[in-house]
Each structure stands twice: as structure tokens, then as C-alpha cells.
Image: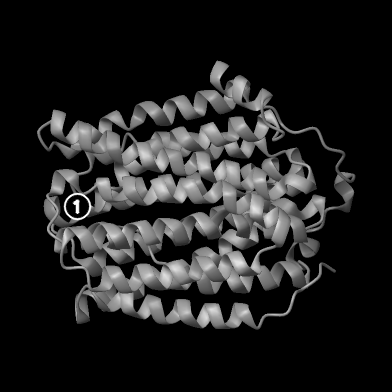
Amino acid sequence: MTIVAGLAARSPIPATVWLLGFVSLLMDVSSEMVQTLLPLYLAGGLGASALTIGFIEGVSVAIATAAKFLSGILADWSGRSKPLAVLGYGLSALSRLVFPLATSIDLVVLGKAMDRVGKGIRGAPRDAMVAAATPPAIRGAGFGLRKSLDAVGGFLGPILAVVLMLAFLGDINAVFWFALLPASLALGLLVLFVREPETAPPPRKTFRLAQAMRLNRAIWSVLALASLISLARFSEAFVILKALDAGWAVSFVPLAMVIMHAFYGLATYPAGRLFDRIGHRALLICSLGFLVAAHLTLGFADNVGLFILGTILWGLHMGLSQGLLGAMIAAATPDHLKGSAFGTFNLVTGAVMLAGNSAAGWLWQGWGSATPFLVGAGISVLAMGLLAFRRGTKPD
């Protein structure tokens, strides 16, 4: 807490955003410790195919999207976001008890479902709290900071996974048990120190479910763009599996995520600051250029050097795009519908990712590991073209 207070005192960004960022950091440490090893555990320990892994990733996203949508609407209806965020982070922490006990694919699916439901529940209310706590003039920086701290967690988690894999002599289950610790710390920080932002919401009687379903054209324009980007960028589980094709030893595969999240974190906050100054179009086109390059590099990666380059490019794409989409949704949405907007955003993009992950697994299994990356590059080029000729959409 002393570190958080010191950083917040030197920053124009509110302390609530810093705290939520550190909650995300700790939970992402835990998540990455599990997620960077889970595809290897499924493929090596349980004999799952690439198609099965893609389907599991897709189903997990589908479960999460339904939870994200409902939690966003509930946040607007209740006028409170923190209780839902606590519930979401709590479910994700509880799921860490399932993975080390999983001896079948069914139990892995159960653990993933719990984790994804938790992620789904917490995402929209957390983003709504960030939006409520941050002044409009620095909203891009606020979302960028939160994403940057999340990316730091994504950087530290795989490092811990590698260290623990070496310490435990390759025992993946022991690493899964250890992942419970940072998840518990994240939940404690949220419960004890994060305060609900003080806002002046409209009376509850003004909220209508039908109103939440009728988001304005500006929001739907962002949703359409985000959906195409989500289709082009499938789960990082396939990047992890590609590391084995490039010749990495299993114990060191999590380092791929360290590299990716390092560049992700370095790019996210500056991208948020640039969004506040120049808008989204140029940054998103640049991010899609990095994604095209990442797909092509990973598709043809047959050695460690090319694979590392591909993960760097993927991380830069994530850093330039992720915080911006959230800031665009916040800017286009009335205050009393922010939870619904973020919930719908997550629902729509998650449904697209379900299709994309399943298709990536099918392409990998049927036509080889390069195919999903090459198809992803083509979709990214299409998204770049549409974005370049897209007209600006003003909020209704």
C-alpha cells in the first residue's frame, strides 16, 4: 500500500485507478502462471489436440462473455460496481484450487469456467470504476495505466512460472498451487483498500433494461471495429504451442509470455497518453500493422529467434490497441450506461473470439501450425483497410 500511495501522490491519475491496476497486476501474475503452462499440461499431460485446446479456449471465452454482459447491466442497475468486482475476483481466486487437482480435461474445463466467469463478472464493473474515477481529459491515460499494470503482471507471472518449474523440477501442479497466493493477495487488496468512486448517478428509476440494449451508434461503431480485431487476434495459447515448434524446452516456454507482456506493458501507457492527444485512428492502424507482422513472423517461425521477434510484435500490437478500445467505449457512453456498454463490448468481442479460437484450432490441426497465423494476418489487413476509410462517429 505504501508503494501505491507514493505512486498515486506523484501522478494526476486518481489513487483508485492505481489500486485497481495493482489488483489487476496481482491477479494477472496468478493467471499467467496457470495459463502459460495449461496448454502444455493439456497437450503433454492429458493428450489434448490443438482442436481441443482451441475449443476449450473458445468455450471459456463464451462463458466469460455472458458473465461480462450481465455484470455490466447489474452494475448500472444497482449503481454500484465494487461488489460485482469482488465477486468476480473471488471466483477467479477460488478456481486456483481446481487446476492442481485436475486429472482430466473435464476438470480443466471446470477450472477454466470458474476463472472465466470470475473474469467476466469483474471486467465491466472494474472498467466502469476506472471511467468514473478518471477525469475525461486524462481518461486514455487512466485506462492505459490500468492496462500497463495488468501487463506487468503478465510479465512477472511467466517469470515466476519458469523459476518455479526449475525449482520444482518441472512439476506443473506445484506451480498451479503456488498461483493461489497472488490471487488471494489481489482479492484482499480489492476488498480492504479500493473504494467505490463517488459519483452522482441518475435516480435508479431512470435505468431500463431496454435502454441498456439501445446503445448509441458511436458505441456500436467501436464494437464492430473491436470485433474484427478480436477475430484477427486469437488466444495466446496458440503462441505458446508455437514455441514448441520453434524448439523451446517446455520449462522455458513461459518466457515467451514474459517477452510479450514486457513490450505490451511498455507500449500501453504511452498509447493511452497519445490517444488523449491525437485520437484512435493512427494508433489502431499502427497496432494492426504490428499484428500483421506478428502473424507472418510466427507463421513461418522455425527457430527461436523468429519466434521471439513474433512475440515482441504481438506484444506491441496488444499495447497499442487494448487500452484504446476501453477509452473509446468510455468516451462514447453516458455515465449511467457505462457498465452496460462495457458488458456489451465484452459480450460481442467474446463471441467473436469463441469463433476465432475454435477456427484457429481447426486450421492448426487440419492444415498445420502456420495456417491460423496466415489467416489472422489476412483479417488484420482487412481491419486496417476498414479503419483507414472509417468515418468518425459522434455519440448520439
* Residue 234 appears in the picture as rendered: yes
Height in image: 244 above or below 148? below
Q: The N terminus appears in which quarter of the rendering?
A: top right
Residue name at image x 42 percent, y 45 percent? 115
Residue name at image x 47 percent, y 46 percent? 265
Q: Which residue is mark 1?
A: 40
Q: The C terminus appears in which quarter of the rendering?
A: bottom right
Residue name at image x 69 percent, y 73 percent? 221
Question: Going by the image, does 29 lie left or right of 276?
Answer: left
Total marks placed: 1
> Element under label 1?
helix
Which amino acid is tagged 1? Leu
Height in image: 210 above or below 12? below
Residue 158 on image: x %, y % = 30, 41
- Along the line of sight, the residue nearer the viewer: 37 or 355: 37
Residue 390 on image: x %, y % = 67, 80
Height in image: 396 above or below 121? below
Determine which quarter of the picture holds residue 34.
top left
Residue name at image x 24 percent, y 61 percent? 307
Residue 228 on image: x %, y % = 53, 74
Find the residue positioned furthest to the top.
2
- Along the line of sight, the residue nearer the viewer: 80 or 139: 139
